[in-house]
Image (cartoon, rainbow, N blue to C red):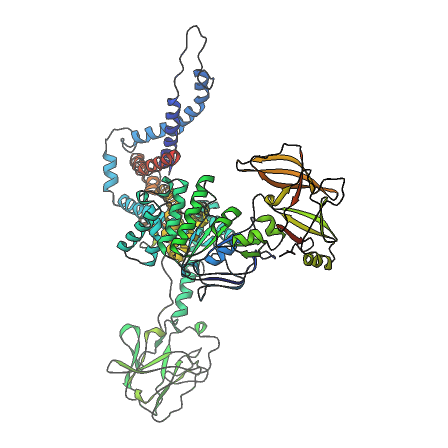
Amino acid sequence: MATVTFDKATRIYPGGEKPAVDGLDIEVGDGEFLVLVGPSGCGKSTSLRMLAGLEDVNAGAIRIGERDVTHLPPKDRDIAMVFQNYALYPHMTVADNMGFALKIAGVNKAEIRKRVEEAAKILDLTEYLARKPKALSGGQRQRVAMGRAIVREPQVFLMDEPLSNLDAKLRVQTRTQIASLQRRLGVTTVYVTHDQVEAMTMGDRVAVLKDGLLQQVDSPRNMYDKPANLFVAGFIGSPAMNLIEVPIVDGGVKFGNALVNVERDAVQAAADKGDRTVTVGVRPEHFDIVNGESEGKSLSKDAPAGLAVTVNVVEELGADGYVYGSAKVGDEDKDVVIRVGGRAIPEKGSVLHVVPRAGETHVFATSSGERLSD
Amino acid sequence: MAPAQVAGATAGAGGGGSSAAAAPPPGPGKGSGPRRSVMGTRPWVAAVFLLPALVLLGALVAYPIVYTIKRSLYDADGSAFIGLKNFGTVFSDHGILTAVRNNVVWVVVAPTVATALGLVFAVLTEKVRWGTVFKLIVFMPMAISMLAAGIIFRLVYEQDPSQGVANAVVVAVHDTFTDNAAYPGARPRPNSDLAPSAGGSFTSKSAAAAGTPADLPLVGIPQNKVPAGAQDARPASPQPGVVTGTVWLDFRPGGTGKPGVIDPGEKALSGVKVQAVKDGKVVASAKSGKDGTYKLPAAAVGAQLRLPASNFSGKYEGINWLGPSLVTPSIIASYIWMWAGFAMVLIAAGLAGVPRELMEQARVDGANEWQVFRRITVPLLAPVLVVVTVTLMINVLKIFDLVYIIAPSSSQQNANVLALQLYLSSFGGGDDQGVGSAIGVILLLLVLPVMIFNIRRLRREGRR
């Protein structure tokens, strides 16, 4: 068991100017499950491969425990990696695949056999040990890849989108299996995914990357409640947070026909920077529908309070539903997503008046994208 | 060469024939008009389209095979049936047995080494920046005809280092590590103190004394072989306690010099090794300087002086590449030069199909580069390696041109292979087409198992 430290680690691909990973600075605690998440091309896989030793580190350092591994070859790092396509050796049986690392390390045969069988039992693979990978289903192959990592008893597990080749149902199932297995073994794990649901459900902490730059590292809860900037706000959560640019008025910000109270300091901070507008983020579940009722916050008496949203599409999911509509903010039409109760689904084409719930709004500076409210 | 090509073509024709036969024969149906096969063709139309191929295959492939087999059972002028006597001749003739033995060496060594080299090239070029350029260069010999390659290597293996690059390299390397003899052919003046001793060296009869210069006159070096910068010889100054003397060419143009005396104008011989020998053991040694003088320490007093053979031995001639013992390995090397590129290109193509992650996974699993190569790369490339080796084996069984061109007539018998013997027996002096045909049939039989193996493997692959 060990900690993992990225100390301003930077990777510039040969022939490129812009770093693929730019000064990555993360500390992963002993036994922690850290998820690297971000859109494709954000450098998350590169970060993982740098930790594995499969990519050079051009600047900065990477440490596993107290050991500086920045320039060590992969074989000396005591890590196990699970690849997206599992990278099972096609010419070896499942047992040989799982025992390969031990065989290379010179462990005796009886011991290899014992440890492979133990791991196979944990992963329910005992009856497939004599098979070749091509005679296994996708889920079984995924488990063999996991088993190969477990057998090693390494200091760190590295997983590069290990679930993306599974079908949706199996993915959800395997997701919890991997998370619980990791808790049980207590091995420090760095997990890469592009799926923010995986990130939120599996990780102790989540690190969001964009264009090689670390945006935020935090627990899933905090990531959801207090996204550090516009990018994280838009990336974390499904459906995505509504981000609407609104003008600053006295005492708050003008949101459609309603005035939304946000922290005075936040608005002040934006105004000080010379911004005339701020971007308000509201999650779909944090809209209240105020059809016809006057909440007393309405700016003009003759129109109903809140933002008028024309319903375009309704997604019914049973327990609840999502309304995809458009609202006129300023002179532009903006797409808005609103969660509604499963029993009160509005009709297509109808108009809803919504106001964001007090205390659940996020305010970001329009110019820099940084969070203003706390 | 011809029989093996014939075998390949027959195998192809066999495959085509069986698939054609598999189609249900459409028969004429009554009342419902002419019946057609699935493709909508009438049988006679199909036959017309098949005819050109069948005629060509029959005339160029099937008939020659049958005729060759028949011819192998007749005598030299093809008039009398003699059964299997030709085969008996093949297996009892000494020259032909050499050919069989050489063919075995060829089939075992050439494809293996070419494939191994190709594998190494393919794996290594993947890692270097200019890999494609390297591959192109290694592949280039494939563009040369066997005949041209043969001529190239005939020159490469030329005995004279100024013509054959192989010997030029060998001689240069040899001369770098071994002192070349300075004065080949030099010898002492007859009736002088120096007398020939064992191994081409010369030893003085009297013992060397301190204080009196022991001069060592040599003759037998033509004036034009004396190094251009040689100085005039100078008598060594007597020194107490050490042995001194001069080594020089005791000859002056025009024969005006006196024997045993250092006359003015006689050239010093520098760099000659002088040893002092006591009871058969070398107790001291020295080299003559620019003016021909040498100086041996006190230990040499009372010893006999010897000029070792290394001063006079002839020039190193290099290796006799095309001599009887090396001719086959030399020709195999030229074959590998041509075909390693072919192996490399095929293996590199196979390597491109192997997922990178497998190697990376192995590295993460703790394997070093050699273990990755040995346990992952090679097993994954095994199918390609088999294809390349088998292809080269078929190719090597038919080898003719390289051997015919490279081997000089003096060692042609030592380099003999079956295809060459086929030619020699039939046309090149043997004038016995019966024996030639018998060799052709034997070659066909040798190629067949490899062909069958290859076809079965291809079928298996196709089914997968």
Whole-percent x, y for residue A13 in the image: 56, 56
- Please say whether residue A177 is visible from this viewpoint: yes
Quarter of the picture containing the C terminus of chain A is: bottom right
Of residues A191 and B141, the one drawn nearer to the viewer in this rendering: A191
Total tally of numbered discs in the picture = 0
Residue B223 in percent (x, y) is at: 44, 74
Is A368 placed above or below B197 here? above
Q: Position of residue B114 (x, y in %)?
A: 39, 49
Q: Nearer the viewer, residue A278 or B387?
A: A278
Left-right relation of B136 to A126: right
Task: Say which quarter of the image contains residue A323.
Answer: top right
Look at the image and tell me whether residue B406 can be seen: no
Q: Residue at x 41, y 41 (%)?
A: A138
| Above or below: residue A55 compared with residue B353 | below
> A344 or B192: which is nearer to us?
A344
The residue at the point 31 percent across, 58 percent down is: A106
Q: Quarter holding the N terminus of chain A? A: bottom left
Q: Position of residue A219 (x, y in %)?
A: 52, 55
